[in-house]
Image (cartoon, rainbow, N blue to C red):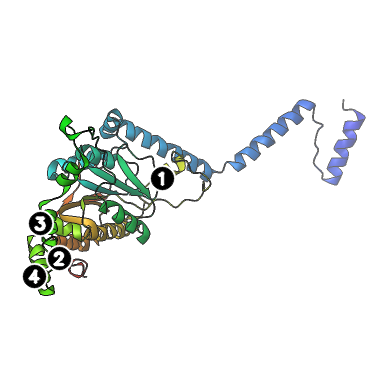
Amino acid sequence: MLSRRILCTLTNSFLLESRYIPPLCACSVAATRSRQRVCLTNKSNTPSAARRAVRFASSSTRWKARQSRDRFSREAKVQGLKSRAAFKLLEMNEKYKLFKPDNTVVDLGYAPGSWSQVAVNRTAPNGRVIGIDIIPVQPPPGVSTLQGNFLSPEIQAGVRDYVRDPDLGRPRKRVSFASAKDEGGVTEEDLEQESRGYIDLERHAALDGGGRDRAGEQDEEAAERERLSRRERDERQGRVVDVVLSDMSAPWYQTTGFWKNSISNAYFTSRMMNTSGIPFRDHVGSMDLCTAALTFCFDTLRSGGHFLCKYYQGAEDKALEMKLRRLFEKVHREKPESSRKESREAYFVALRRKELPTREEVFKD
């Protein structure tokens, strides 16, 4: 039989059309609250957020798996190279013989430094390598570096002034001087005499011969210009660089970490990502950087020097190739084996700079 209290409750609910809710015990209340917490958690983790997290995790996993399977990445780690990009330069140098001992090399966009490592090794024992990059990176041993935006005129002027001094950036020579010349030592006068070339000796001998009229001096200057070698003519115009390398790419814009000055900060490593995922944007940006590097070559690269630049393939690379052919004897397009097949990057290898072309002839549209 039903108790009187329950019978009254049922009667009231039927008459008032209300819903009967039986009393809950303590265990039922706890279970209900736990179900509510689960519901709130599921609402915060929406399907789009979950898919985004899975996508990021899978992308990172795929990148790590690709790096572990890539033989060039493994070999770079074994040989102590900064990155696998060193094998691209090694392959092209093996084919075109870009470097010679004692060369002066300028590496534009040198970070993380693998191309500079190859250049230092191939220009030994008395070569010099100068690297320029906007990202602060620890330079490899034997590399002189300058941090700054290469597109800035002040940075380019600083690089030109640096390379025009033949002694800056080269390994120091150890010379021991004896107290007396008869003891077999080398004096400073002997070193200075040896460093003076034949042209300098002829010039000083002409100056010591006494004063001459202005017309005679002009004739001698014209004859001297004819006697000057191609290397000396280049040095008078500031063309002292033997090889210019350009691996420049626009880094990602910095959005945080402005207060950090550490060169090992992981944020700077992510800024070296050189593609945006938009092919046209990457192509146009690479064309601007290659044109800036070519302008630098015109001002600083000596006759017979070489130029190597990376670009992303697109509609405007043909115009850049035409400019290169006006300034260099041979121009080649290269896609090294160590460059990934899915990448749109390629390289222009310009060999043996011509001496006579003018700026207007090279950069005309």
Pointer 1 residue:
136
Q: Is residue 94 left or right of residue 77?
A: left
- Point out the frontmost of discs 4 and 2: 4
Residue 212: x and y, percent?
11, 70
Q: CA distance from mark 3 to mark 2?
A: 30 Å
Badges 4 and 3: C-beta atoms under 8 Å apart? Answer: no
For the residue pair 132 and 236, the one nearer the viewer reads as 236
Q: Which mark is residue 357?
A: 2
Secondary structure at numbered mark 4 = helix
Amino acid marked by disc 3: Glu
Residue 223: x and y, percent?
7, 65
Residue 302 image-quadrant placement? bottom left
Q: Which mark is residue 219?
A: 4
Camera sees residue 329: no
Residue 155 image-quadrant placement? bottom left
Image vertical order of residue 201 relative to residue 210, above or below:
above
